[in-house]
Amino acid sequence: MAKVVAYFTRRTNQLVQFSGPRLATAWKYSKAELGPPSLKDLGEVQNSISSIVTSYKTGAYRKLTVREAWLNTLVTAEVFCWFIAGECIGKGSIIGYNIPGAVNWDMHF
Amino acid sequence: MPATPLPAARQISPLIRFARWTALLSGVVYGVTRYNYLAKREVGIQKHENEIREQYKKKKAVQDEINMKAEMEALGKEAGVVPK
């Protein structure tokens, strides 16, 4: 029994030692790249939105290259997928709305 | 393994980050509200379906009686027992 405890404590220490700095770098990059925009950035957000609106009004969007348009489409698709991810979190399930009494996931032969 | 310095973090445009977070949070709100709306509707639907289930159970019980009587008579005929 003491050997088992010693083994698991040694392995846990190794795990903590291994993952500590790696998790720290991952957190540093995540905070910089994935974090929400700060209050200072909201002005930039407004400028970006108004520039998109003016490019639509003036017809300048037709001068975009196909590559840029494709990248914009991909970004829009990704934002929509984040909405779906949020909906899955809100409804508490991945596939459907599991209302008790309304769902039956059993196999029907 | 010698540590090579990792590149600096990329600058993601604030509009994209704002859009992602807005989509995520509004998705959560939408999921919660839609779940509550469907759960509220389900109460009335379950009541209605329970009534239908009751009626079906009664009908099934009547039909089961008839079937059992017919089976017993057939068995009796095979066994040569005269029904009362």
Image (cartoon, coloured by chain):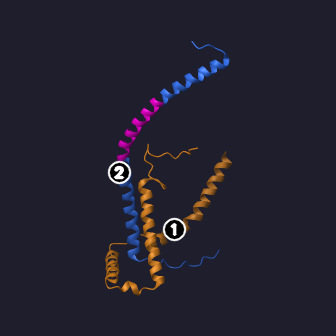
Give residue B49's mark: none
Q: Percent from the top left, x then y, of residue B51?
A: 39, 35
User: Where, quadrant-wise, is the N terminus of chain A in this rendering?
Assistant: top right
- Determine whether, in the image, residue A25 is placed left or right of residue A91: right
Question: Predominant secondary structure in magenta?
Answer: helix
Secondary structure at badge 2 equals helix
Residue B83 seen by the camera? yes
A14 or B30: nearer the viewer = B30
The numbered mark 1 sits on a residue in which chain?
Answer: A
Question: What separation in Å lies between label 2 and label 1 (alpha carbons)?
Answer: 42 Å
Q: In this view, does A53 lie above or below B19?
A: below
Identify the chain drawn in orange. A
User: From which residue to which does the magenta span run?
Assistant: B40-59
Secondary structure at badge 1 equals helix
Residue B54 in magenta stretch: yes
Q: Mark 1 points at which residue?
A: A24
Residue B68 placement: quadrant = top right
Q: Is residue B65 above or below residue B2?
A: above
Residue A36 seen by the camera? no
The numbered mark 2 sits on a residue in which chain?
Answer: B
Residue A75 placement: quadrant = bottom left
Going by the numbered disc 2, the residue's amino acid type is: Tyr
Local packing at callout 1 (Cα closer than 10 Å; few below 14, some 14-19, many 20+) is few
Identify the residue at image location x=64%, y=49%.
A5
A96 or A89: nearer the viewer = A96
Local packing at callout 2 (Cα closer than 10 Å; few below 14, some 14-19, many 20+) is few
Identify the residue at image location x=42%, y=61%.
A86
Q: Mark 2 points at which residue?
A: B37
Going by the numbered disc 1, the residue's amino acid type is: Ala
